[in-house]
């Protein structure tokens, strides 16, 4: 914690020149000009009602597992610590459960599994907060957040008005939502309501999942079985940010149309690809990056992970801009070799 606190007294303290090192999983040592942690909506309103902050740039921070801080943040960081989970209602098939935005996503998944509520088991062990889950429509092992999403409540920063968003209004896409595009930085997500199942339809279609189920001779997996297997695979494949700074997949998997795919496939017949329902073709970005020779390469304090080229890592002491430079070099080499643009999934500041 920084020694300097802000002169104006709010319900919670505003810190100045605050180190964000422990607040981003890349473990980049950037600072925030101002920083506040709020754990009630009243605390948040108390602060935002002060006209002093009107022209100050703001960043909403959850677990910091999907951001790259390329420089100090010249504004106010609002760390969301709104906690609480509540079952709103149930029908013969569903539970409607509201979780406040500051809850840890994985703790929420564990809660659902303990209560035998289905739908989020494939999304086990994704770092970060409930509030960020709709931001990029988190997804893994064949399931996306939009499959269980019911609605969310958000506060518009400029007007301080609360608004509810339905799934349609969130415009969910592949690692996308309206909050990453047209409404970027305009709303603070306060809570999310999920629709979870009673009669579970297990989704074990993802290759790695079905293989392990077969190996373990599990014919009729429970939601707990799926969660345990997802956790097992993730722990064996992905670097733990506590040991090695990273923000998961740095880039999105590119989706290309049929004519682009045809010429790509003629030249690179060995490339993995997936036919998508929208008629496009998904090419794993990790494969493209690996083919450009980046996998396991160490450049200064940074690199592309040795087992998972899509994950850029901080080997210790890297500046955010060093990681960003590596990302840009990777992007350029993929474009030169394959004529495919890979877009960042991580939010760059
Ligand atoms: P942050 O990094 O704090 O914020 C991300 C963005 O959302 C920022 O722009 C921030 O301003 C905004 N934001 C955060 N909270 C709010 C809010 N309440 N209101 C408005 N805006 C907000 N992602 C996947 O989709 N699938 C995976 O399988 C996956 N695996 C990962 C594995 C590892 C090891 C790591 C490090 C990351 C992984 N991620 C994955 C990425 C990341 O965990 C998710 O995107 C997660 O949802 C980010 O949550 P967060 O709270 O850390 O968000
Ligand atoms: P993987 O199983 O090695 O597969 C590589 C890529 O191929 C994945 O990105 C996945 O796309 C795609 N893929 C695999 N099977 C598919 C299918 N049947 N249909 C369509 N696409 C398919 O991937 P991994 O790196 O170990 O990750 C496993 C899962 O965890 C993936 O879903 C991945 O998205 C998720 N994950 C995400 C992050 C993140 O930060 N976003 C980090 C780690 C893991 P999709 O990515 O679209 O699923």
Image (cartoon, helix red, strand yellow):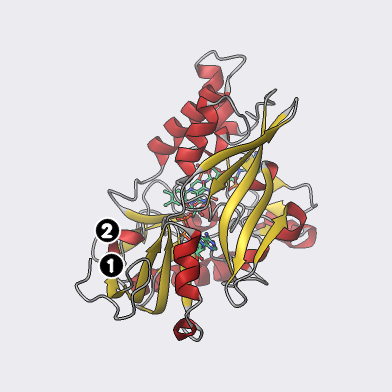
- Quick one: quadrant of the C terminus? bottom left
Residues at marks 2 and 1 touching, judged by CB atoms closer than 8 Å: yes
Residue at image position (48%, 33%) is: 110
Q: Position of residue 253 (x, y in %)?
A: 60, 55
Q: Which residue is mark 1?
A: 318
Residue that extends furthest to the left in the rendered view of this protein: 3
Q: Position of residue 92 (x, y in %)?
A: 75, 25
Q: Is residue 215 left or right of residue 184?
A: left
Q: Position of residue 136 (x, y in %)?
A: 59, 57
Could you say whether the residue bearing mark 2 is in a helix, strand or loop? loop
- Give the crowd class for mark 2: few <14, some 14-19, many >=20 residues within 10 Å: some
Residue at image position (46%, 53%) is: 82
Q: Which residue is mark 2?
A: 315
Q: Is residue 207 left or right of residue 27?
A: right
Q: Is residue 280 left or right of residue 112?
A: right
Could you say whether the residue bearing mark 1 is in a helix, strand or loop? loop
Q: Nearer the viewer, residue 344 or 128?
A: 128
| Residue 125 visible in rendering | no
Mark 2 Cβ inside 8 Å of ligand 1: no
Find the distance from the CA under tag 2 to the CA under tag 1.
7 Å
Residue 158 vs 92, above or below: the answer is below
Residue at image position (52%, 22%) is: 225
Residue 61 vs 88, above or below: the answer is below
């Amino acid at each position: 914690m920084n020694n300097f606190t802000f002169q104006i007294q709010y319900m919670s303290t505003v810190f100045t020149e605050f180190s964000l090192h422990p607040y981003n999983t890349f473990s980049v040592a950037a600072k925030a000009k101002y920083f506040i942690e709020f754990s009630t909506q009243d605390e948040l309103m108390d602060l935002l009602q002060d006209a002093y902050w009107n022209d100050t740039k703001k960043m909403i921070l959850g677990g910091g597992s999907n951001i790259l801080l390329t420089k100090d943040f010249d504004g106010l960081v609002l760390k969301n610590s709104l906690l609480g989970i509540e079952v709103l209602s149930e029908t013969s098939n569903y539970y409607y459960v509201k979780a406040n935005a500051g809850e840890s996503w994985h703790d929420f998944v564990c809660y659902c599994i303990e209560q035998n509520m289905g739908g989020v088991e494939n999304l086990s062990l994704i770092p970060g907060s409930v509030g960020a889950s709709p931001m990029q429509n988190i997804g893994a092992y064949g399931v996306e957040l939009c499959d269980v999403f019911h609605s969310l409540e958000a506060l518009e920063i400029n007007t301080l008005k609360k608004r509810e968003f339905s799934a349609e209004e969130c415009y969910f896409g592949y690692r996308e939502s309206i909050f990453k595009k047209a409404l970027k930085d305009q709303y603070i997500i306060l809570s999310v309501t999920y629709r979870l199942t009673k009669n579970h339809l297990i989704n074990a279609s993802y290759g790695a999942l079905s293989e392990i189920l077969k190996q373990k001779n599990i014919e009729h997996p429970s939601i707990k079985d799926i969660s345990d297997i997802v956790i097992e695979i993730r722990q064996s494949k992905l670097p733990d940010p506590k040991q090695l700074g990273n923000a998961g997949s740095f880039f999105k998997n590119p989706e290309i149309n049929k004519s682009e795919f045809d010429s790509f496939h003629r030249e690179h017949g060995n490339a993995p690809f997936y036919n998508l329902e929208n008629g496009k073709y998904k090419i794993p970005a990790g494969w493209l990056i690996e083919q450009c020779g980046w996998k396991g390469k160490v450049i200064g304090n940074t690199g592309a992970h040795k087992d998972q080229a899509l994950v850029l890592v901080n080997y210790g002491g890297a500046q955010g801009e060093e990681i960003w430079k590596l990302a840009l070099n990777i992007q350029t080499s993929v474009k030169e070799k394959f004529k495919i643009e890979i877009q960042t999934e991580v939010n760059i500041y």
